[in-house]
Amino acid sequence: MTQSTKRDVSPMTSKRKSTDQIELGKGDALLVIDIQNDFLPGGSLAVPEGDQVIPALNGYIDQFSNRQLPVFATRDWHSSNHCSFIRQGGPWPEHCIADSKGAEFAADLHLPVSIHVISKGTDAEQDSYSGFANRTFKEQLDNAGVSRLFIGGLATDYCVLNTVRDALNFHYKVLLLTDAIRAVNVRRQDGENAINEMIQKGAIPITLTMIR
Ligand code: VGL
Ligand code: ZN
């Protein structure tokens, strides 16, 4: 009715179409990071509320699977003498030891049969928070013609952060699934700082309801 109503309403409706809705298509891939028992409540390196990302991730998996778009899942896959373990002088309790129950993907995560599994942290001498530490990951993305990566999982302030940094450095377009990440928060602000950094570097924050 008034001028201010007009100014407020019409530009927002046109903006909403371009920024609040995301159409999936060729070149898109989903990357689910480290949804393993040891990072979930009851696990040896439990991320607070880590299990709460699973329903949203299942929703994203459905969206990508329905369109036959590729889904990748990283897993932390350590030897029992991994350098990141406290016993070896590292910062973490033992976690995600290859082939152990704690290293298994969460049973209620609905990974498709076509899932591409990316193992990382397999070298005992090196901690690798990024999925790109596995050199074959980049090759697989290139072979699949992926240009846009939708990234969620655990933990916001370690593996998600480092994977997103690498993805942006490799010039992938990155969509950060803010309803499907949780932080360890060794320091109280770590998760928030990580999200701010990822967005500042170019990651676009989205939620499941924006996908159509
Ligand atoms: C991770 C701590 C230790 C992660 C892996 O995947 O975020 N965090 N190892
Ligand atoms: Zn680890």
Image (cartoon, rainbow, N blue to C red):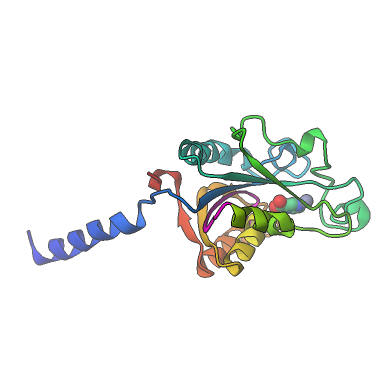
Q: Which residue is at 18% across, 60% downward? A: 10
Q: Which residue is at 62% across, 33% downward? A: 113
Q: Which residue is at 68% across, 54% downward? A: 137
Quadrant occupied by the C terminus: top left
Q: Looking at the picture, how far across and down is residue 52, in whole percent?
A: 57, 39
Q: Which span is picked out in magenta?
A: 144-156
Q: Looking at the picture, how far across and down is residue 44, in whole percent?
A: 78, 41
Q: Which residue is at 38% across, 49% downward? A: 23
Q: Is residue 101 above or below residue 209?
A: above
Q: Looking at the picture, how far across and down is residue 200, in whole percent?
A: 51, 69
Q: Nearer the viewer, residue 21 or 139?
A: 139
Residue 188 visible in the current orientation: no
Q: Is residue 79 above or below residue 16?
A: above
| Left or right, 189 with reference to 23 | right
Residue at the front extreme of this rendering = 143
Quadrant occupied by the N terminus: bottom left
